[in-house]
Structure formats: C-alpha cells, structure tokens
Image (cartoon, rainbow, N blue to C red):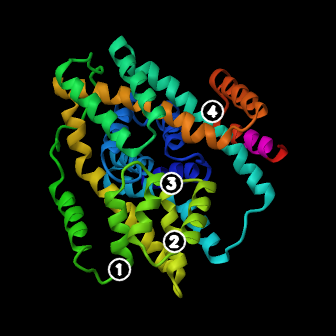
C-alpha cells in the first residue's frame, strides 16, 4: 500500500507545475476523480484544514491523503513521493549553479499553461459540488472578489474567518453526510506536543541552528511558498538578496512544492556536505505543517459531523472555491498567459480536457510540445 502511495505521488511530484492551487487541481483529478481514494467532501475538508494551518498547503493535503489511505506510513510515503523530485532538482541546481536550457524553459512554459487548465477545471467542478445554494455561491463570489482586490495573506485569513463566523449565525445547508472515522476523533496531543516543543526550543538554541531557522519559518508562514520568501529572509541572515531571488526563481520553475526553496537555500549555505545541509533545511521547513496536519486530521473529520460545524465546513468549502478562483487569475494566469495565442491554447486545452477526458500524461506531453514550439 505505501509503495503504491509513494509511486502515485512521485508521478505527480515529477509533473505538478504551477504552485499550490495547481497541485490541488492535480490531486483532485487524480485521487478523487480517477482513483476514487476519497470523496469530494473529504477532499474539501482537507483543503479547509490546510488553509487555517501554517505550512505548505498542497503538501499538507497530499500528506493527509496518504494519512487517510494508510496511516502515518502512508502520509510519509505521500510526502516523500511528492517532494523527492523537486528536492533532487533543486539540489542539483544549487550544486551546479547552471542555467536552464532554452528548450527546458519552453517545456516549463507549456506546463504552466496546462496548470491554468487544471485549476480552471478544479474551480468549476468544486463550485458545482460546494456552491449549490445561493448563499454558498455568494460566499464563493465575495471571497473571490475580496482576494482579487486584496491579494494578501491577511485578506485570505480574513475571508476564511468571516465565512466561518457567518456560518455560526446563519445555518448553511449541510454537506451530505459522509463516512468518518470516529474511533479516534480527538486532537493527537502527543504530536501537537512535539510540534510545540520543537517550536519553543528553536528560540532557546538547538544543536543545529539551520534546523531551528527553517523550522521557525515553516511554523509561522501562512499562505504557502510565495509567502515563505520574506519570512526566510528574516530568519536566515546568512544569505544575501541575490541568493534568495535565485532560489525563488528556481522553485517557480521546477515541479512540486515551492517549499523546496529550502533545499536550494540549505545547499547554498553549506561549505561542505551540501546534500546534508539541503536535507536538514528541507525537513525542517516541511515538518511543522505536517505535524499540525497529523495532529488535527481526525479531529477535523469527526467535528464535521456536528450540525453547526457542518455549516462552518460548508462555508469554508465555498470560501476555498473563492480562494482557488482568485489564485486561478493571480498568480497562475498572470504567470502563464501573456498573449492571445496563449489564451487560445488554454481555451482549447480546457475544452479537450473537460469533454474528451484524455489521460493527464497525454495532456502533459501535448502542452510540453506546444511550449517548446512557442
């Protein structure tokens, strides 16, 4: 089971360009629609939980999928599979300091266009599932507008908090009941204690300062990879501005989670044992978010069966649709579509993907070829 989970996530880790929103689209298409590992409702609950926890959202959702599928070993297998490709690529880039070839840049350009298609499909299908009533459609619409006008971390948190607050007063139509595991529905206190203890002692000195710096960044950042850059600049003073910008550009260009920027930065700090420094930085920045997801995973699932909490879940799911819709425009559309030709390609690709339903590998190959030709 764990090998199968690792293999499925490794494939996605090799091909998932476009950032967290695109990754969530890939996950939904692969694990919900194609493999049927979990329901739309359960998947949306995982996204909702990842949105209110610090850490890398798509990696946390992937970890939760593996966790539900095969326990903690499944969660670890999912994380390793999804992260390993970007870790190896970023380590290689840091060690060689080489520039990407023009042909590879073309492939990446094409895959970014495919990311637009994937996220658009995810927004549409999730809107159909979670915005069936007028109040929920209004929540999604307002969330989208707010985040388009105020594309900041604080606006995102405000939208989620507002949606949950309204749901406590106004009872939204609950999501249809789905099976939950109620045998262990409490917060995993030992795991939460490990997270808290590690976080506290990072401020009082650890044998490894590198681990402390990146653990603090992973524990404090909300909003994913785009937000982690300024936080890392404050917590890792050893690196200059050029190193950070180079690492950020590399993280944008490779598949997988943007938190793999830690791999590049860890390797850049090292004077020797480069791979070890890269590994420590990578584990440290991901660990807080994964521990929190593990701690609250079962609790969130069981709470969703309570009437008032089900109402909150409905509102949060609708708000998540708004978050994805806003992310579809910025940064995904803005970072991929620069001409009328790109718009035509995205539109045609969406029609093909939506109605002909070809396998993802075929679409990846098609968009890669298109990117090289362009």
Residue pictured at 73% horizontal, 26% vertical: 348
Determine which of the numbered discs, if any, sits on residue 265 in the image.
Answer: 2
Q: Answer whether labels 2 and 4 touch (C-beta < 8 Å).
A: no
What is the distance, in whole Å, between disc 3 and disc 4 at their CAs?
A: 19 Å
Q: Secondary structure at mark 2?
A: helix
Which callout, 3 or 1, points at the residue further toward the start of the chain? 1
Which callout, 4 or 1, points at the residue further toward the start of the chain? 4
Residue 169: where, in percent of width, then height? Answer: 17, 21
Above or below for 73 versus 314: below
Q: Nearer the viewer, mark 2 or mark 4?
A: 2
Residue 370 in magenta stretch: yes
Q: Nearer the viewer, mark 3 or mark 1?
A: 1
- Residues in magenta? 365-371
Residue pictured at 26% horizontal, 73% vertical: 202
Which callout, 3 or 2, points at the residue further toward the start of the chain? 3
Q: Nearer the viewer, mark 3 or mark 2?
A: 2
Determine which of the numbered discs, if any, sits on residue 257 in the image.
Answer: 3
Q: Which residue is mark 4?
A: 117
What is the distance, in whole Å, between disc 3 and disc 2 at their CAs?
A: 15 Å
Q: Is residue 265 left or right of residue 101?
A: left
Q: Main secondary structure of the magenta part?
A: helix
- Quick one: label 2, few (<14), some, or many (20+) residues within 10 Å? many
Which callout, 2 or 4, points at the residue further toward the start of the chain? 4
Residue 122 in magenta stretch: no
Q: Secondary structure at mark 3?
A: loop
Residue 309: where, in percent of width, then height? Answer: 19, 29
Q: Secondary structure at mark 4?
A: helix
Q: Answer whether labels 3 and 2 touch (C-beta < 8 Å).
A: no
Q: Is residue 166 left or right of residue 2?
A: left
Q: Nearer the viewer, mark 4 or mark 1?
A: 1
Q: Which residue is mark 1?
A: 209
């Amino acid at each position: 089971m764990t090998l199968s989970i690792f293999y499925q996530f490794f494939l996605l880790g090799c091909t998932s360009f476009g950032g967290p929103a695109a990754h969530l689209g890939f996950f939904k298409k692969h694990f919900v629609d194609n493999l049927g590992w979990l329901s739309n409702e359960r998947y949306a609950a995982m996204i909702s939980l990842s949105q209110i926890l610090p850490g890398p959202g798509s990696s946390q959702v992937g970890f939760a999928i593996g966790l539900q599928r095969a326990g903690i070993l499944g969660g670890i297998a999912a994380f390793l599979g999804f992260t390993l490709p970007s870790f190896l690529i970023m380590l290689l880039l840091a060690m060689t300091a080489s520039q990407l070839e023009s042909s590879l840049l073309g492939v990446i350009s094409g895959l970014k266009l495919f990311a637009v298609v994937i996220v658009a499909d995810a927004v549409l299908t999730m809107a159909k599932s979670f915005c069936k009533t007028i109040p929920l459609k209004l929540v999604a619409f307002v969330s989208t507008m707010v985040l388009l006008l105020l594309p900041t971390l604080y606006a995102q948190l405000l939208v989620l908090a507002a949606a949950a607050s309204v749901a406590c007063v106004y009872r939204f139509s609950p999501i249809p009941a789905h099976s939950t595991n109620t045998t262990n529905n409490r917060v995993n206190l030992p795991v939460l204690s490990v997270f808290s203890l590690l976080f506290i002692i990072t401020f009082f000195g650890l044998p490894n300062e590198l681990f402390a710096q990146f653990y603090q960044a992973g524990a404090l950042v909300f909003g994913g990879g785009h937000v982690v850059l300024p936080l890392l600049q404050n917590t890792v003073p050893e690196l200059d501005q050029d190193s950070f910008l180079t690492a950020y550009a590399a993280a944008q260009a490779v598949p997988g989670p943007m938190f793999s920027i830690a791999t590049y930065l860890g390797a850049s700090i090292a004077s020797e044992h480069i791979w070890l420094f890269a590994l420590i930085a990578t584990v440290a920045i991901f660990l807080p978010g994964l521990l929190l997801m593990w701690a609250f995973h079962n609790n969130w699932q069981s709470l969703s069966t309570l009437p008032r909490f089900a109402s909150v879940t409905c509102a949060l799911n609708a708000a998540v649709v708004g978050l994805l819709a806003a992310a579809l425009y910025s940064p995904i559309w803005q970072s991929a579509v620069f001409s009328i030709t790109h718009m035509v390609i995205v539109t045609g690709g969406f029609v093909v993907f939506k109605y002909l339903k070809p396998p993802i590998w075929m679409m990846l190959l098609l968009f890669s070829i298109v990117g090289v030709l362009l």
